[in-house]
Amino acid sequence: MSTPFYVSPQQAMADRAEYARKGIARGRSLVVLQYTDGIVFVGENPSRALHKFSEIYDRIAFAAAGKYNEYENLRIGGVRYADLRGYTYDREDVTARGLANVYAQTLGTIFSSAGEKPYEVELVVAEVGTVPEEDQIYRLPHDGSIVDEHGSVAVGGSAEQISSYLDQRHRDGMTLAEAVELAVQSLSRDTNGGERRLSADQLEVAVLDRTRPQKRKFKRIVGSRLARLLEGDSAPEPAAEEDGTGTAADADTEE
Amino acid sequence: MEANTRNTGRLPAAFLTPGSSSFLDFLSDHSPELLPGNRSLPPVRGAVEAPHGTTIVAATFAGGVVLAGDRRATMGNVIAQRDIEKVFPADEYSAVGIAGTAGLAVEMVKLFQLELEHFEKVEGTQLSLEGKANRLSTMIRGNLGMALQGLAVVPLFAGWDVDREKGRIFSYDVTGGRSEERGFAATGSGSVFARGALKKLYRAGLTEEQAVTLVVQALYDAADDDSATGGPDLARRIYPVVTVVSDEGFRRLTDAEASETARAIHERRLEEPDGPRASLL
């Protein structure tokens, strides 16, 4: 029998935090930006099937950096939470704040419970309002804290660097094309100041678009539409085309 | 570990258990009391008095399928509601119309919509049309106990099959038995008369507009002969709910469009009360 070493609680927590942070840093970063018609999610993701961004409910979406199986688990938990709440009460009673709280409690409990390994994930929960002032973006680090963000937020590997880049350049009332361009610039600077060019098939882009007529506001931007957006085609999409390709449902099946 | 999962506000284990993409499975795991199938009625004598919805009709056309329902709910010989809605979108590419006990039917539709949406969000892809039809079958079967006590729910399910690129209709019986219908179908108390009208007027290759006229004609005939089915109420401006599902997705006709069709039919029927005549041979 070995004698257990005494480890101070501070040290234990610091170790766990470092473990989680290292795990998150291995993943690629992603950014979430407000633009005039909603909230846009941009991340580097070569996979077409394993998403970093997902729909949770009508106006609420989820973004995650870190370990896939862990955030996927949390994502499904969130969908179940939202659907159950909407079924028990009403669709309007499902809010990003409530969901962020549940995530924070879950992450916090796991983080501080000695029996479990901390989750190596950092989440963003966003809800689009009817006007930009009502948009909500919450960032949830691995330890269960909640940060109420405005304008722009970055999570993942070089989040700090990207955040400060975004903070300086993001402004209210950007168009979707401007916001995506800024997001891609910030992600391209990712590696030690060197510039890379990210092409459409390396990116995952999704929006919560408050102008969508459907009650479900989440939509993935894929294929030719994404390519056009990246070329800086800032002309607004013709409404007909958007409706044609356009439900949350078939955007999902398009890939 | 167990102590940790209590009273912390964290998501309970059922929420984080991987495996199922079904909301119904999740409910039966986490809060079975919310599932309609888990309720049992105390034995009652005679029929339970509750509003019943009546006639639903559907017909396919070249680019999709039309599903429509009248607006009446009855309770015994009383008209319980004049403007009830019994046809709903199930998801982007399908619609469901329900005859039977109104309260249970609306709950079933709500749960069915949620089931499809939940699967779509979790899996990132839609169920096949057959898959959707089978889920509905299971839900009706769950209601069998109630059905035997007179609280049956009998839906009609119609949708655009994205893979086969055509509109399809599925009808059900109270035990959850499912059958695909060719061309047209009807359910509910007025369905006998509606089906007669559909049979005489339906033909392959209808346009969307013609299919809309066809189903409203069938509802008119059902209302003509079945006291529980409501015809277009011109005085109160209550018209049938008509929905169209095509490759562009689900669309409900606006009141203006529905009223135009209903009024046109009504005008013709002032001259010919029995409606259009099919040829004898």
Image (tube, helix red, strand yellow):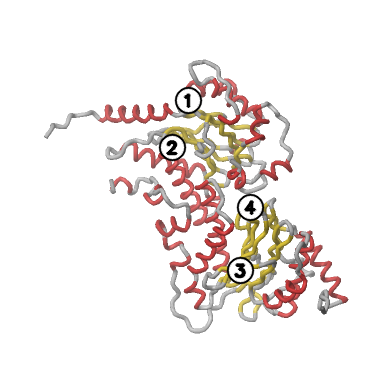
Question: Where A111 sits versus B135, above or below?
Answer: above
Label 3 sits on residue: B171
**Quarter of the image with the N terminus of chain B in it:** top left
Is residue B155 something one can see in this rendering?
no
Q: CA distance from mark 2 to mark 3?
A: 42 Å
Task: Name the image quarter holding residue B106.
Answer: bottom right
Label 2 sits on residue: A68
The type of residue carrying mark 3 is: Ser
Task: Between label 4 and label 3, give the one nearer the viewer.
Answer: 4
The type of residue carrying mark 1 is: Ala
Image location (x, y in percent) of residue A15 = 30, 28
Label 1 sits on residue: A159
Label 4 sits on residue: B162
In the rendered view, does A4 fall on the left or right side of A116? Answer: left
Q: Residue furthest front?
A: B281
The residue at the point 52 percent across, 31 percent down is A45
Front one among A173 and A204: A204
Rate crowding at label 4 as few (under 14), some (14 to 19) or many (20 or more) other CA atoms within 10 Å: some
In the rendered view, does B19 fall on the left or right side of A167? Answer: left
The residue at the point 60 percent across, 54 percent down is B91
